Image (cartoon, rainbow, N blue to C red):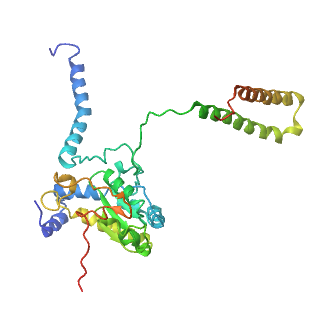
């Protein structure tokens, strides 16, 4: 049951705080997103800088970098995902606790970046796992990562707990397991997870 | 029943039990309703490093590793003791020198013993 925004502000002026269970739940979720202690390439250096005192990711409740996927809710794909590393990344994503989020950080993670033509580089991690926020840059500055983090928080805030678009862990039918690609003869097999990514259609 | 001298104790016991179990029960209820588990085969795997575990965890290690490690440790510590001995060598009296020599000789004897036993040969 949503409360009218204007009424809420009016009540707030009178010292009455009105909220919904969904708002409280999402407030708790977005304020305690624990990232996984996991870096892939040079973007990881910027990610480390973001957690340090100058940029201070702790302000958003995300300073607790967990070295185990079991305790983490957010995966920052910080750098180039090679085809050799992709199965491990997907497997780690599968092992993370629900609800889990992914930030694809930097040009490499979102598309392959400068190494896109390389035979051994995955052209974007969103081929295998659902990515919540993409941030461009090579590497993105810590401010960009903070921006991505705030975007993710906004996304969590707006998420309904029931009905369409609810978090995966509250939806018994939603898939919890994303198939891990295997090393094939020439490429990863399958080349993409069809439920997550489809070949984009270019409209000219 | 209320006249029983242990009645108040029993009441306290029940309250204490409830005090501990109620938060646990509420946490469990919260988990079931608002954060249901979503397990899958990969999530329940043993390893957390992204790789698949291979083989059995019940493997045997050769005891030679242990012997090598323990001998290394002894002589490693000996080197730590030798350093201050060498630094203070000029100012030491005979008793200190002799006791240090005894210490070194004991270790040398140990090395000779290990050598004779064939521990130093890696097979």
Q: In which quarter of the image is the N terminus of chain B?
A: top left
Residue that sits furthest to the left in the current view? A1
Q: Can residue A61 be seen in this view?
A: no
Camera-nearest residue between B26 and B100: B100
Which quadrant would residue A107 be assigned to in this image?
Answer: bottom left
Q: In which quarter of the image is the C terminus of chain B?
A: top right
Q: Can residue A9 be seen in this view?
A: yes
Camera-nearest residue between A11 and B76: B76
Residue that sits furthest to the bottom in the current view? A204
Name the spot of residue A47 as percent of width and height, x first.
Answer: 44, 64
Camera-nearest residue between A163 and A157: A163
Residue shown at 31% from the left, 44% from the top: B44
Which quadrant would residue B85 be assigned to in this image?
Answer: top right
**On screen, B120 above or below A112?**
above
Name the spot of residue B70 as percent of width and height, x first.
Answer: 64, 32
Name the spot of residue A42 as percent of width and height, x first.
Answer: 48, 67
Name the spot of residue A170 as percent of width and height, x first.
Answer: 18, 53
Which quadrant would residue A105 be assigned to in this image?
Answer: bottom left
| Left or right relative to A166: residue A126 | right
Residue that sits furthest to the front in the current view? A185
**On screen, A132 above or below A99?**
below
Camera-nearest residue between B80 and B30: B80
**Count of labels shown?**
0
| Left or right relative to A195: residue A146 | right
| Left or right relative to A22: residue A69 | right
């Amino acid at each position: 049951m949503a409360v009218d925004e204007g009424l809420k502000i009016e009540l707030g002026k009178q010292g009455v705080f009105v909220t919904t269970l969904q708002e409280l739940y999402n407030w708790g979720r977005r304020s305690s997103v624990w990232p996984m202690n996991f870096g892939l390439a040079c973007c990881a250096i910027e990610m480390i800088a973001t957690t340090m005192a100058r940029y201070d990711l702790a302000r958003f409740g995300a300073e607790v970098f967990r070295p185990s996927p079991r305790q983490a809710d957010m995966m920052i794909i910080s750098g180039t995902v090679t085809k050799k590393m992709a199965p491990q990344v997907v497997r780690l994503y599968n092992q993370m606790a629900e609800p889990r989020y992914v930030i694809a950080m930097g040009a490499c993670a979102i598309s392959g970046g400068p190494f896109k033509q390389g035979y051994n580089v995955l052209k974007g991690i969103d081929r295998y796992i659902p990515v919540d926020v993409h941030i461009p840059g090579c590497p993105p500055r810590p401010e960009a990562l903070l921006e991505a983090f705030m975007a993710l928080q906004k996304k969590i805030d707006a998420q309904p707990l029931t009905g369409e678009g609810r978090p995966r862990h509250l939806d018994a039918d939603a898939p919890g397991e994303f198939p891990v690609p295997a090393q094939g003869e020439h490429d990863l097999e399958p080349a993409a997870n069809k439920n997550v990514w489809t070949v984009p259609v270019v409209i000219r | 029943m209320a006249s029983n001298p242990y009645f108040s104790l029993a009441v306290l016991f029940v309250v204490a039990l409830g005090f501990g179990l109620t938060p646990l029960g509420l946490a469990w209820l919260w988990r079931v309703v608002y954060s249901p588990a979503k397990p899958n085969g990969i999530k329940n795997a043993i390893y957390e490093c992204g790789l698949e575990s291979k083989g059995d965890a019940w493997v045997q290690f050769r005891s030679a590793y242990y012997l090598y490690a323990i001998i290394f440790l002894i002589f490693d510590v000996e080197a730590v003791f030798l350093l201050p001995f060498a630094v203070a060598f000029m100012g030491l009296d005979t008793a200190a020198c002799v006791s240090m020599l005894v210490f070194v000789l004991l270790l040398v004897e140990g090395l000779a013993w290990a050598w004779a036993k064939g521990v130093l040969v890696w097979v």
